[in-house]
Image (cartoon, grey):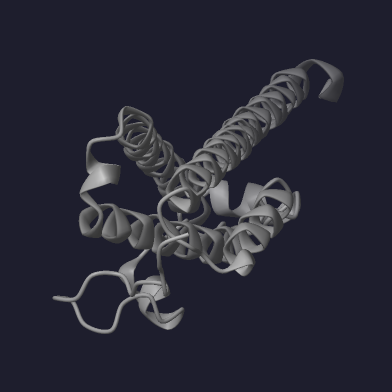
Amino acid sequence: MDLSVHGSPIILIVLLLFLLSVFYFISIYNQLHKLSNGAESTLSQIRVAMKKRLDMIEQLVGSVKSFAQFERGVLENISRMRARVGIADLSDLTRIEGESKGIFGNLVAVAEDYPQLKTSDTVMMTMNAIEGMEDEISRHRYTYNNIIQNFNTMLDSIPSKYVASMVGLRKMDYLNFEEDELRRLGYLTTKEEGPSRPEVGWD
């Protein structure tokens, strides 16, 4: 019996299955890599938007200071957050989000107390810009969490979970900006209450 003749189809089938497995492995890896890069890119956009919002909040504090006194620590805290946001991990971004919302909530409350601020074009334009930036952050966060959901679903599925394990990929965390973070920081005490207000007075 000539094994070289009869064995050729078997070898070709094995080789074909091997090549298909390699291509399938590469395809799954590329999908995971694309999702991972998409998550990182979206997270970068969130960081940029959060930094822009902090810049606007600082401008708003500057406008409000001409009507009411704020502790110097408010501006120092904004500067610290702005320096951290570019390198912050998810938990730190959540803390920055809570602190930023708390400060902005305080400024809105002050504006409600002083009619002069409510009629100031600069103050109202800045507040509207901050609210617009918050909407942008929310959209980016929604996109980010959708990407993470798809990524984590692949890591729960066969055979992509084995591919991920082979290349050292692990599940990624969602980005959750919740009221609980505001409450933990002391800006909210109950669901009905708004953010706490700083001590203010006339210059």
- Image point 48% across, 59% down: which residue? 203
Residue 158 visible to an observer of this rendering: no
Q: Is residue 145 left or right of residue 95?
A: left
Residue located 71% across and 24% down the image:
19
What is the quadrant of the N terminus in the image?
top right
Residue placed most toward the observer, 69 or 97: 69
- Percent across and percent down for residue 131 are 32, 39
Image height of 106 relative to 108, above or below: below
Residue sticking out furthest to the top: 5
Residue at the left extreme of this rendering:
192
Where is residue 82? Give x, y as percent.
66, 49
Closer-to-camera residue (96/3): 96
Q: Is residue 126 left or right of residue 193?
A: right
Count of marks, rendered view: 0
Q: Depth check: 102 or 153 in front?
A: 102
Measured along the vertical axis of the image, is residue 109 above or below residue 29? below
Residue placed furthest toward the front: 203
- Residue 150 image-quadrant placement: top left
| Residue name at image x 36 percent, y 79 percent | 183
At a point 63% along the width and 68% down the height, the residue shown is 73
The image position of residue 118, as x and y in percent, is 23, 42
* Position of residue 108 measured from the top left corner of the image (x, y, whole percent): 30, 54
- The answer, for residue 126, to whether it is visible in the render is yes
